[in-house]
Image: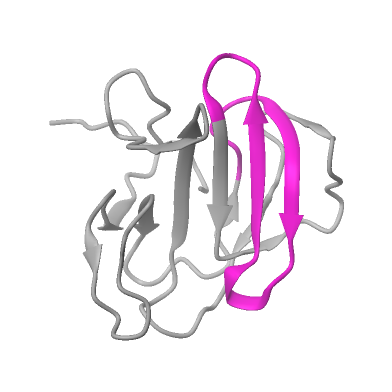
Amino acid sequence: MGSGSVQWRLSGLFMEFRNTGSFDHFHDGIDITDVPAPTGELVFPVDNGTVETIYYGGDNSYVSITHSQGTGRTVYLHIDPNDNLTSGQPVSVGTLLGSVRDIAGPGDHLHFNEGFNYAEVNPLQSGHIAPFDDER
């Protein structure tokens, strides 16, 4: 999301329990945000790949990318997808996927999800695609 020199804050962690009252669940990705909220921030893929799905569904709009280098699939949720993208289109790390949308509810953020062999994985684990560098 945005410039590679920015350290984004995580507001939701992988497998954190979400007690929403109507749809209790474990969080299947991470939420990347900033203060103030990142509405309008540009979103780029973390690795080269191919556009799998572009979904226009209001607050739940997303783009999913399949990756050829053993990394599986990544999903970028709560974005306004780039109208120039098409399913099957090759993308690189510099390809604009869209921008973070102004959503109702828990605050504006990019929900980032990584899957491998049809299972969700923690993208912050060693050996997976990490959307930021931990400078600790």
Q: Is residue 93 visible?
A: no
Per the rendered image, the range of residues in magenta is 44-72
**Identity of the residue drawn at 59% across and 69% down:** 60
**Identity of the residue drawn at 59% across and 14% down:** 69
Quarter-wise, where is residue 17 in the image? bottom left
In the picture provided, is 80 more to the left or to the right than 40?
Answer: right
Q: Is residue 55 visible?
A: yes
Is 49 included in the stretch rendered in magenta? Answer: yes
Closest to the observer, 29 or 84: 29
Quarter-wise, where is residue 49 in the image? top right
> Is 35 rendered above or below residue 93?
below
Q: Residue furthest left?
A: 136
In the picture provided, is 47 more to the left or to the right than 88?
Answer: left
Location of residue 30 in the rendering, given as x and y in whole percent from the top left corner: 35, 51
Q: How many marks?
A: 0
**Identity of the residue drawn at 62% across and 60% down:** 99
> Is 93 rendered above or below residue 96?
above
- In the rendered image, which quarter contains the C terminus? top left
Location of residue 101 in the rendering, given as x and y in whole percent from the top left corner: 58, 71
Location of residue 74 in the rendering, given as x and y in whole percent from the top left corner: 55, 39
> Is 81 rendered above or below residue 121?
below
Location of residue 39 in the rendering, given as x and y in whole percent from the top left corner: 52, 70
Tell me the colour scheme of the image: one colour
**Identity of the residue drawn at 30% across and 34% down:** 124
Is 109 included in the stretch rendered in magenta? Answer: no
Q: Residue furthest top?
A: 69
Quarter-wise, where is residue 121 in the image? top left
